[in-house]
Amino acid sequence: GSGLVKNLSLVFLTFQNSALILVMHYSRVMPPDGDHRYFTSTAVFLNEVIKFAVSLTLAMYETSKTLAPSTPATVLFEQIYNGVFSSDGWLLAGPAALYTLQNLLQYVAVGNLDPVHFQVLYQVKILTTAVFSVLLLRRQLGLKGWVSLIILTLGVCVVSLPSSEKAADSFLLHGVPDHFFPRSKHELGQTVAGAAMPEPAPHLSKRSATYEGIAKDLPPADPIMVYSAGVSAVLISAIVSGLAGVYFEKLLKESSTNASLWMRNVQLSFYSLIAAFLGGCVYQDGAGIGEHGFFEGYNAVVWAAILLQAAGGLLASLVIRDADNIVKNFATSISIVISFIFSVWIFDFTVNITFLLGTLLVLLATYIYSVPERKTHRPPPVHIVS
Ligand code: C5P
Protein backbone atom coordinates (compact mmCIF):
# COMPACT_ATOMS: atom_id res chain seq x y z
CA GLY A 1 0.00 0.00 0.00
CA SER A 2 1.02 3.63 0.51
CA GLY A 3 3.39 2.64 3.34
CA LEU A 4 5.39 0.51 0.90
CA VAL A 5 5.56 3.34 -1.66
CA LYS A 6 6.72 5.69 1.09
CA ASN A 7 9.45 3.38 2.38
CA LEU A 8 10.66 2.50 -1.12
CA SER A 9 10.83 6.20 -2.01
CA LEU A 10 12.90 6.84 1.11
CA VAL A 11 15.37 4.04 0.30
CA PHE A 12 15.70 5.15 -3.33
CA LEU A 13 16.12 8.76 -2.24
CA THR A 14 18.97 7.84 0.11
CA PHE A 15 20.90 6.07 -2.66
CA GLN A 16 20.03 8.80 -5.14
CA ASN A 17 21.43 11.39 -2.71
CA SER A 18 24.80 9.68 -2.40
CA ALA A 19 25.10 9.00 -6.12
CA LEU A 20 24.06 12.55 -7.03
CA ILE A 21 26.66 14.22 -4.83
CA LEU A 22 29.48 11.92 -5.98
CA VAL A 23 28.63 12.37 -9.67
CA MET A 24 28.02 16.11 -9.32
CA HIS A 25 31.32 16.53 -7.51
CA TYR A 26 33.18 14.53 -10.12
CA SER A 27 31.56 16.58 -12.90
CA ARG A 28 32.97 19.76 -11.29
CA VAL A 29 36.54 18.57 -10.69
CA MET A 30 37.25 16.41 -13.74
CA PRO A 31 39.21 18.22 -16.44
CA PRO A 32 36.74 19.40 -19.11
CA ASP A 33 36.69 17.60 -22.49
CA GLY A 34 36.27 20.80 -24.46
CA ASP A 35 37.41 24.37 -24.10
CA HIS A 36 35.51 25.12 -20.99
CA ARG A 37 33.85 23.35 -18.09
CA TYR A 38 30.04 23.21 -18.37
CA PHE A 39 27.92 26.05 -17.00
CA THR A 40 26.01 24.89 -13.91
CA SER A 41 22.95 27.02 -14.75
CA THR A 42 22.38 24.98 -17.91
CA ALA A 43 22.34 21.81 -15.80
CA VAL A 44 19.84 23.33 -13.36
CA PHE A 45 17.69 24.44 -16.30
CA LEU A 46 17.73 21.02 -18.03
CA ASN A 47 16.91 19.32 -14.72
CA GLU A 48 13.73 21.41 -14.63
CA VAL A 49 12.95 20.59 -18.28
CA ILE A 50 13.01 16.88 -17.42
CA LYS A 51 10.89 17.29 -14.28
CA PHE A 52 8.43 19.48 -16.18
CA ALA A 53 8.05 16.87 -18.93
CA VAL A 54 7.53 13.98 -16.49
CA SER A 55 5.14 15.93 -14.24
CA LEU A 56 3.13 17.23 -17.19
CA THR A 57 2.74 13.72 -18.58
CA LEU A 58 1.55 12.36 -15.24
CA ALA A 59 -0.72 15.35 -14.56
CA MET A 60 -2.31 14.97 -18.01
CA TYR A 61 -2.83 11.26 -17.49
CA GLU A 62 -4.41 11.97 -14.10
CA THR A 63 -6.66 14.71 -15.51
CA SER A 64 -7.72 12.54 -18.45
CA LYS A 65 -9.11 9.97 -16.03
CA THR A 66 -11.46 12.57 -14.55
CA LEU A 67 -12.83 13.57 -17.97
CA ALA A 68 -15.25 11.74 -20.26
CA PRO A 69 -13.46 9.41 -22.77
CA SER A 70 -14.28 11.53 -25.84
CA THR A 71 -13.14 14.86 -24.37
CA PRO A 72 -10.85 16.65 -26.85
CA ALA A 73 -7.18 17.04 -25.89
CA THR A 74 -7.53 20.83 -25.95
CA VAL A 75 -9.76 20.63 -22.87
CA LEU A 76 -7.03 18.65 -21.15
CA PHE A 77 -4.41 21.28 -21.95
CA GLU A 78 -6.79 24.01 -20.88
CA GLN A 79 -7.16 22.42 -17.45
CA ILE A 80 -3.39 22.23 -16.95
CA TYR A 81 -2.95 25.75 -18.34
CA ASN A 82 -5.57 27.09 -15.95
CA GLY A 83 -3.85 25.30 -13.07
CA VAL A 84 -0.46 26.86 -13.80
CA PHE A 85 -1.76 30.41 -14.27
CA SER A 86 -4.47 30.38 -11.60
CA SER A 87 -3.93 32.57 -8.54
CA ASP A 88 -3.26 29.35 -6.61
CA GLY A 89 -0.73 28.09 -9.18
CA TRP A 90 1.14 31.38 -8.99
CA LEU A 91 1.96 30.66 -5.34
CA LEU A 92 4.45 28.02 -6.52
CA ALA A 93 6.65 30.79 -7.91
CA GLY A 94 7.91 31.23 -4.31
CA PRO A 95 9.29 27.71 -3.73
CA ALA A 96 10.37 27.63 -7.39
CA ALA A 97 12.65 30.64 -6.90
CA LEU A 98 14.01 29.20 -3.64
CA TYR A 99 14.68 25.71 -5.07
CA THR A 100 16.43 27.26 -8.08
CA LEU A 101 18.72 29.25 -5.80
CA GLN A 102 19.35 26.11 -3.75
CA ASN A 103 20.19 24.04 -6.83
CA LEU A 104 22.60 26.67 -8.16
CA LEU A 105 24.34 26.96 -4.78
CA GLN A 106 24.61 23.19 -4.47
CA TYR A 107 26.81 23.13 -7.58
CA VAL A 108 29.10 25.77 -6.06
CA ALA A 109 29.31 23.75 -2.84
CA VAL A 110 30.08 20.33 -4.35
CA GLY A 111 32.64 21.92 -6.65
CA ASN A 112 34.62 23.32 -3.73
CA LEU A 113 34.22 20.67 -1.04
CA ASP A 114 34.74 16.96 -1.10
CA PRO A 115 31.50 14.94 -1.18
CA VAL A 116 31.71 13.79 2.43
CA HIS A 117 32.16 17.21 3.99
CA PHE A 118 29.42 18.46 1.72
CA GLN A 119 27.06 15.73 2.93
CA VAL A 120 27.78 16.29 6.63
CA LEU A 121 27.47 20.09 6.44
CA TYR A 122 24.34 19.87 4.30
CA GLN A 123 22.63 18.13 7.21
CA VAL A 124 22.08 21.62 8.65
CA LYS A 125 18.95 21.45 6.53
CA ILE A 126 17.53 19.04 9.13
CA LEU A 127 17.64 21.89 11.64
CA THR A 128 16.34 24.59 9.29
CA THR A 129 13.57 22.28 8.02
CA ALA A 130 12.48 21.53 11.59
CA VAL A 131 12.40 25.20 12.54
CA PHE A 132 10.42 26.16 9.43
CA SER A 133 8.04 23.19 10.00
CA VAL A 134 7.33 24.43 13.53
CA LEU A 135 6.86 28.02 12.34
CA LEU A 136 4.94 27.50 9.10
CA LEU A 137 3.22 24.14 9.58
CA ARG A 138 2.75 24.38 13.36
CA ARG A 139 4.42 20.97 13.83
CA GLN A 140 5.26 19.80 17.35
CA LEU A 141 8.69 18.23 17.76
CA GLY A 142 8.72 16.97 21.33
CA LEU A 143 11.73 16.59 23.62
CA LYS A 144 13.34 13.77 21.61
CA GLY A 145 13.09 15.83 18.42
CA TRP A 146 14.76 18.88 19.92
CA VAL A 147 17.49 16.86 21.68
CA SER A 148 18.42 15.14 18.43
CA LEU A 149 18.48 18.49 16.65
CA ILE A 150 20.87 19.94 19.25
CA ILE A 151 23.20 16.93 18.89
CA LEU A 152 23.01 17.32 15.14
CA THR A 153 23.96 20.99 15.30
CA LEU A 154 26.90 20.17 17.58
CA GLY A 155 28.09 17.51 15.16
CA VAL A 156 27.91 19.85 12.18
CA CYS A 157 29.83 22.53 14.13
CA VAL A 158 32.57 20.04 15.01
CA VAL A 159 32.93 19.02 11.36
CA SER A 160 32.84 22.54 9.97
CA LEU A 161 35.28 24.38 12.19
CA PRO A 162 38.84 23.77 11.05
CA SER A 163 41.36 24.45 13.82
CA SER A 164 44.19 25.43 11.50
CA GLU A 165 45.04 25.94 7.88
CA LYS A 166 46.39 22.43 7.80
CA ALA A 167 43.03 21.16 8.99
CA ALA A 168 41.29 23.27 6.37
CA ASP A 169 43.55 21.71 3.78
CA SER A 170 42.16 18.30 4.65
CA PHE A 171 38.76 19.53 3.46
CA LEU A 172 40.07 19.83 -0.03
CA LEU A 173 39.51 17.07 -2.43
CA HIS A 174 42.61 15.60 -4.03
CA GLY A 175 41.83 17.47 -7.18
CA VAL A 176 41.32 20.92 -8.50
CA PRO A 177 38.56 22.74 -6.63
CA ASP A 178 36.01 24.33 -8.93
CA HIS A 179 36.89 27.73 -7.55
CA PHE A 180 40.43 27.51 -8.90
CA PHE A 181 39.92 25.64 -12.10
CA PRO A 182 41.13 27.62 -15.11
CA ARG A 183 38.30 29.05 -17.15
CA SER A 184 39.44 27.44 -20.38
CA LYS A 185 41.68 24.83 -21.94
CA HIS A 186 43.65 27.70 -23.40
CA GLU A 187 44.45 29.03 -19.92
CA LEU A 188 45.17 25.50 -18.75
CA GLY A 189 47.58 25.11 -21.68
CA GLN A 190 49.35 28.28 -20.61
CA THR A 191 49.65 27.33 -16.96
CA VAL A 192 50.99 23.86 -17.66
CA ALA A 193 52.94 24.70 -20.82
CA GLY A 194 56.23 22.90 -20.83
CA ALA A 195 55.69 21.44 -17.39
CA ALA A 196 56.07 17.68 -17.35
CA MET A 197 53.36 15.82 -15.51
CA PRO A 198 54.92 14.82 -12.17
CA GLU A 199 55.26 11.20 -11.17
CA PRO A 200 52.15 10.11 -9.27
CA ALA A 201 52.73 9.96 -5.53
CA PRO A 202 52.56 6.32 -4.48
CA HIS A 203 49.57 6.79 -2.19
CA LEU A 204 47.45 8.49 -4.83
CA SER A 205 45.38 6.80 -7.47
CA LYS A 206 46.23 7.57 -11.07
CA ARG A 207 43.16 9.74 -11.46
CA SER A 208 43.80 12.04 -8.53
CA ALA A 209 47.50 12.22 -9.35
CA THR A 210 46.49 13.74 -12.68
CA TYR A 211 44.54 16.44 -10.85
CA GLU A 212 47.44 17.10 -8.51
CA GLY A 213 49.67 17.45 -11.54
CA ILE A 214 47.39 20.12 -12.96
CA ALA A 215 46.91 21.75 -9.57
CA LYS A 216 50.65 22.02 -9.06
CA ASP A 217 50.99 24.41 -11.96
CA LEU A 218 48.08 26.61 -11.07
CA PRO A 219 48.37 29.65 -8.82
CA PRO A 220 48.49 28.20 -5.31
CA ALA A 221 44.98 27.64 -3.99
CA ASP A 222 44.30 29.18 -0.62
CA PRO A 223 42.61 26.32 1.22
CA ILE A 224 40.77 28.62 3.62
CA MET A 225 39.31 30.52 0.67
CA VAL A 226 38.15 27.42 -1.21
CA TYR A 227 36.83 26.02 2.03
CA SER A 228 34.89 29.21 2.79
CA ALA A 229 33.41 29.36 -0.71
CA GLY A 230 32.20 25.78 -0.34
CA VAL A 231 31.01 26.07 3.25
CA SER A 232 29.11 29.35 2.69
CA ALA A 233 27.41 27.85 -0.35
CA VAL A 234 26.41 24.64 1.42
CA LEU A 235 25.11 26.43 4.53
CA ILE A 236 23.04 28.99 2.60
CA SER A 237 21.80 26.13 0.43
CA ALA A 238 20.72 24.24 3.57
CA ILE A 239 18.72 27.21 4.87
CA VAL A 240 17.06 27.73 1.51
CA SER A 241 16.34 24.00 1.25
CA GLY A 242 14.50 24.04 4.57
CA LEU A 243 12.35 27.02 3.63
CA ALA A 244 11.64 25.81 0.09
CA GLY A 245 10.70 22.29 1.24
CA VAL A 246 8.35 23.43 4.00
CA TYR A 247 6.80 26.09 1.74
CA PHE A 248 6.12 23.43 -0.91
CA GLU A 249 4.75 21.04 1.72
CA LYS A 250 2.40 23.74 3.04
CA LEU A 251 1.03 24.49 -0.45
CA LEU A 252 0.65 20.75 -1.15
CA LYS A 253 -1.09 19.84 2.09
CA GLU A 254 -2.87 22.95 3.32
CA SER A 255 -4.23 24.68 0.23
CA SER A 256 -7.99 24.70 -0.32
CA THR A 257 -7.73 23.72 -4.01
CA ASN A 258 -6.38 20.23 -3.22
CA ALA A 259 -4.31 20.21 -6.42
CA SER A 260 -2.62 16.82 -6.89
CA LEU A 261 1.11 16.26 -6.43
CA TRP A 262 1.70 16.13 -10.19
CA MET A 263 -0.24 19.31 -10.78
CA ARG A 264 1.84 20.95 -8.04
CA ASN A 265 5.02 19.63 -9.66
CA VAL A 266 3.95 21.00 -13.06
CA GLN A 267 3.42 24.39 -11.44
CA LEU A 268 6.68 24.19 -9.50
CA SER A 269 8.86 23.16 -12.43
CA PHE A 270 7.18 25.67 -14.76
CA TYR A 271 8.15 28.58 -12.50
CA SER A 272 11.55 26.98 -11.79
CA LEU A 273 12.22 26.91 -15.55
CA ILE A 274 11.69 30.66 -15.67
CA ALA A 275 13.82 31.23 -12.55
CA ALA A 276 16.64 28.98 -13.79
CA PHE A 277 16.62 30.67 -17.18
CA LEU A 278 16.62 34.27 -15.93
CA GLY A 279 18.62 33.88 -12.71
CA GLY A 280 20.99 31.17 -13.97
CA CYS A 281 21.40 31.10 -17.75
CA VAL A 282 21.03 34.87 -18.24
CA TYR A 283 22.19 36.56 -15.02
CA GLN A 284 24.81 34.12 -13.65
CA ASP A 285 26.27 32.59 -16.82
CA GLY A 286 24.88 34.76 -19.62
CA ALA A 287 28.23 36.13 -20.81
CA GLY A 288 29.94 32.72 -20.79
CA ILE A 289 27.06 30.93 -22.49
CA GLY A 290 26.94 33.68 -25.12
CA GLU A 291 30.60 33.11 -25.88
CA HIS A 292 30.91 29.33 -25.58
CA GLY A 293 27.38 28.03 -26.16
CA PHE A 294 24.74 26.38 -23.99
CA PHE A 295 26.15 22.85 -24.21
CA GLU A 296 29.80 23.78 -23.66
CA GLY A 297 31.61 21.10 -21.65
CA TYR A 298 28.78 18.57 -21.72
CA ASN A 299 29.68 14.91 -21.46
CA ALA A 300 28.14 11.72 -20.07
CA VAL A 301 29.03 12.63 -16.46
CA VAL A 302 27.21 15.97 -16.71
CA TRP A 303 24.13 14.27 -18.16
CA ALA A 304 24.27 11.68 -15.39
CA ALA A 305 24.29 14.45 -12.77
CA ILE A 306 21.28 16.13 -14.44
CA LEU A 307 19.28 12.89 -14.68
CA LEU A 308 20.08 11.95 -11.09
CA GLN A 309 19.02 15.37 -9.88
CA ALA A 310 15.73 15.24 -11.77
CA ALA A 311 14.97 11.74 -10.44
CA GLY A 312 15.82 12.94 -6.93
CA GLY A 313 13.50 15.93 -7.21
CA LEU A 314 10.57 13.74 -8.24
CA LEU A 315 11.33 11.22 -5.48
CA ALA A 316 11.63 14.04 -2.94
CA SER A 317 8.19 15.30 -3.90
CA LEU A 318 6.69 11.82 -3.32
CA VAL A 319 8.31 11.63 0.11
CA ILE A 320 7.11 15.15 1.03
CA ARG A 321 3.57 14.10 0.09
CA ASP A 322 3.56 10.67 1.78
CA ALA A 323 5.66 11.60 4.84
CA ASP A 324 7.15 15.06 5.36
CA ASN A 325 10.34 17.07 4.94
CA ILE A 326 11.70 16.21 8.40
CA VAL A 327 11.40 12.45 7.82
CA LYS A 328 12.94 12.88 4.36
CA ASN A 329 16.00 14.67 5.76
CA PHE A 330 16.67 12.30 8.63
CA ALA A 331 16.35 9.30 6.32
CA THR A 332 18.69 10.68 3.67
CA SER A 333 21.35 11.63 6.21
CA ILE A 334 22.35 7.95 6.05
CA SER A 335 23.76 8.79 2.63
CA ILE A 336 26.75 10.30 4.50
CA VAL A 337 27.93 6.75 5.13
CA ILE A 338 27.49 5.69 1.51
CA SER A 339 29.31 8.80 0.25
CA PHE A 340 32.07 8.19 2.77
CA ILE A 341 32.74 4.63 1.57
CA PHE A 342 32.76 5.68 -2.09
CA SER A 343 34.94 8.74 -1.41
CA VAL A 344 37.63 6.72 0.32
CA TRP A 345 37.56 4.41 -2.67
CA ILE A 346 37.33 6.88 -5.59
CA PHE A 347 38.67 10.21 -4.33
CA ASP A 348 41.32 8.98 -1.83
CA PHE A 349 39.39 10.66 0.95
CA THR A 350 41.19 10.72 4.30
CA VAL A 351 39.71 11.61 7.67
CA ASN A 352 40.87 13.12 10.93
CA ILE A 353 39.52 12.55 14.42
CA THR A 354 37.39 15.76 14.55
CA PHE A 355 35.69 14.75 11.35
CA LEU A 356 34.88 11.29 12.69
CA LEU A 357 33.57 12.70 15.98
CA GLY A 358 31.31 15.21 14.23
CA THR A 359 29.97 12.62 11.80
CA LEU A 360 29.23 10.22 14.67
CA LEU A 361 27.21 12.97 16.39
CA VAL A 362 25.22 13.57 13.20
CA LEU A 363 24.46 9.86 12.86
CA LEU A 364 23.58 9.59 16.57
CA ALA A 365 21.13 12.48 16.14
CA THR A 366 19.53 10.68 13.19
CA TYR A 367 19.19 7.54 15.27
CA ILE A 368 17.68 9.31 18.29
CA TYR A 369 15.20 11.12 16.08
CA SER A 370 14.05 8.00 14.28
CA VAL A 371 13.68 5.43 17.10
CA PRO A 372 10.11 5.41 18.33
CA GLU A 373 9.40 6.80 21.80
CA ARG A 374 9.10 4.03 24.43
CA LYS A 375 5.44 3.60 24.99
CA THR A 376 5.60 2.73 28.72
CA HIS A 377 2.48 4.61 29.68
CA ARG A 378 0.20 3.31 27.02
CA PRO A 379 -2.78 1.51 28.58
CA PRO A 380 -3.58 -1.95 27.24
CA PRO A 381 -6.35 -2.02 24.63
CA VAL A 382 -9.78 -2.31 26.18
CA HIS A 383 -12.52 -4.25 24.45
CA ILE A 384 -15.97 -3.10 25.32
CA VAL A 385 -18.50 -5.83 24.80
CA SER A 386 -22.08 -4.66 24.70
O1 C5P B 1 18.33 18.97 -0.60
P1 C5P B 1 16.86 18.88 -0.67
O2 C5P B 1 16.34 17.60 -0.18
O3 C5P B 1 16.16 20.07 -0.11
O4 C5P B 1 16.61 18.90 -2.23
C1 C5P B 1 15.35 18.71 -2.75
C2 C5P B 1 15.46 18.68 -4.26
O5 C5P B 1 14.23 18.22 -4.77
C3 C5P B 1 15.74 20.02 -4.90
O6 C5P B 1 16.70 19.83 -5.90
C4 C5P B 1 14.41 20.41 -5.52
O7 C5P B 1 14.59 21.12 -6.71
C5 C5P B 1 13.75 19.08 -5.76
N1 C5P B 1 12.30 19.09 -5.65
C6 C5P B 1 11.54 18.90 -6.77
N2 C5P B 1 10.17 18.86 -6.70
C7 C5P B 1 9.55 19.02 -5.51
C8 C5P B 1 10.31 19.23 -4.34
C9 C5P B 1 11.68 19.25 -4.45
O8 C5P B 1 12.09 18.73 -7.85
N3 C5P B 1 8.23 18.98 -5.48
Image (cartoon, rainbow, N blue to C red):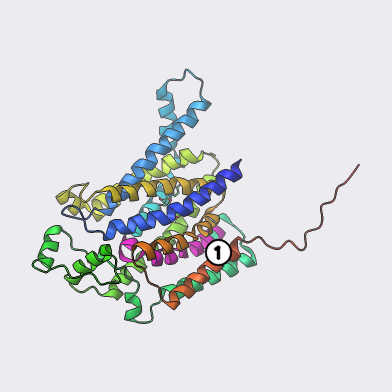
Q: Amino acid at mark 1?
A: Thr
Residue 78 within the magenta-colored segment of the rendering:
no
x then y, percent, for residue 354: 44, 77
Q: Nearer the viewer, residue 151 or 301?
A: 301
| Left or right of residue 189, residue 381 in this image | right
Residue range of the region highlighted in magenta in the rendering: 108-134
Residue 186 % position (x, y) = 11, 59
- Location of the C terminus (image quadrant): top right
Tag 1: Cα neighbours inside 10 Å, few (<14), some, or many (≥20)?
Answer: many
Q: Is residue 23 left or right of residue 359?
A: left
Residue 258: name its quadrant. Answer: top right
Q: Residue furthest top?
A: 70
Q: Secondary structure at mark 1?
A: helix
Identified at 53% across, 63% down, the residue is: 131
Q: Residue furthest right?
A: 386
Q: Residue at x 46, y 53 (%)?
A: 15
Q: Is residue 297 above or below residue 134?
A: above
In the image, residue 88 above or below residue 341: above
Residue 307 location (% of width, % of height): 36, 46
Q: Quadrant of residue 57?
A: top left
What residue would you read off at disc 1? 366
Depth order, front residue of 223/147: 223
- The one of 367 and 108 positioned closer to us in this rendering: 367
Mark 1 residue CB less than 8 A from any atom of ligand 1: no
Quadrant where the N terminus is found in the figure: top right
Q: Residue at x 33, y 48 (%)?
A: 304
Q: Residue at x 53, y 27 (%)?
A: 66
Horizontal and vertical percent for residue 82? 43, 33
Q: Residue 85: in sight, yes or no? A: no
**Residue sticking out furthest to the left:** 194
- The secondary structure that most of the magenta stretch takes on is helix
Q: Is residue 81 visible?
A: yes
